[in-house]
Image (spheres, grey):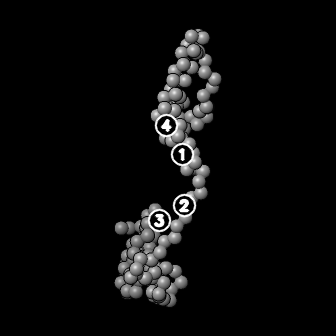
Amino acid sequence: MTMHLEGPWLSTTGKRKGKMKFKSAEQKREYERLDREWKELLKRQGAELEAKKQSRAMKAAPLTYKLSTPVGRSTGHDVKSLDTGHLGAVRTKEIPQYTGTKIIGIGTMHKSNAVPVFSDEQAVDISRMRR
């Protein structure tokens, strides 16, 4: 589906919210009171600490570790590859060629249709456009 058929909800522009507008001063005070209570509740529950832990973890250096071969197993470096003498990874398919004596050649019939010619009589019929 192309973008011009999608609705405005799929837009990648205008995702930032603008300044909040309130209908009245009373509504603004109520919003600020609820926002303060919500932040206090998060602080009591320790959600603020979780956010700090998460941000610290995201800033930390990535873990580095080294893999080692288990005891009793080899790395496989000692196994040599089989050299088949080909340049590529797989052999290319040989082009099939006709080696028989039944077909004399290929004739062109109506609308560039290639047909096999088995005898001289068939070749004459094809040249006269007979089937």
Q: CA distance from mark 3 to mark 4?
A: 82 Å
Q: In the image, 32: left or right of 118?
A: right
Locate the C terminus and report the quarter of the image it occupies: bottom left
Residue furthest right in the image = 19
Q: CA distance from mark 1 to mark 2?
A: 17 Å
Residue at 55 percent of width and 50 percent of height: 57
Q: Which residue is mark 2?
A: 63
Q: Position of residue 64 (x, y in %)?
A: 55, 64
Q: Secondary structure at mark 2?
A: loop
State the count of labels: 4
| Residue 95 visible here | no
In depth, the one of 95 and 83 nearer the eye is 83
**Circles 4 and 2: CB distance less than 8 Å?**
no
Q: Secondary structure at mark 3?
A: helix
Q: CA distance from mark 4 to mark 1?
A: 11 Å
Q: Secondary structure at mark 1?
A: helix
Q: Which residue is mark 3?
A: 112
Instruction: Inspect the image, locate mark 2, and give the three-letter code of the amino acid beneath it.
Output: Leu
Residue at 59 percent of width and 54 percent of height: 60
Q: In the image, 61: left or right of 38?
A: right
Q: Position of residue 55 (x, y in %)?
A: 57, 45
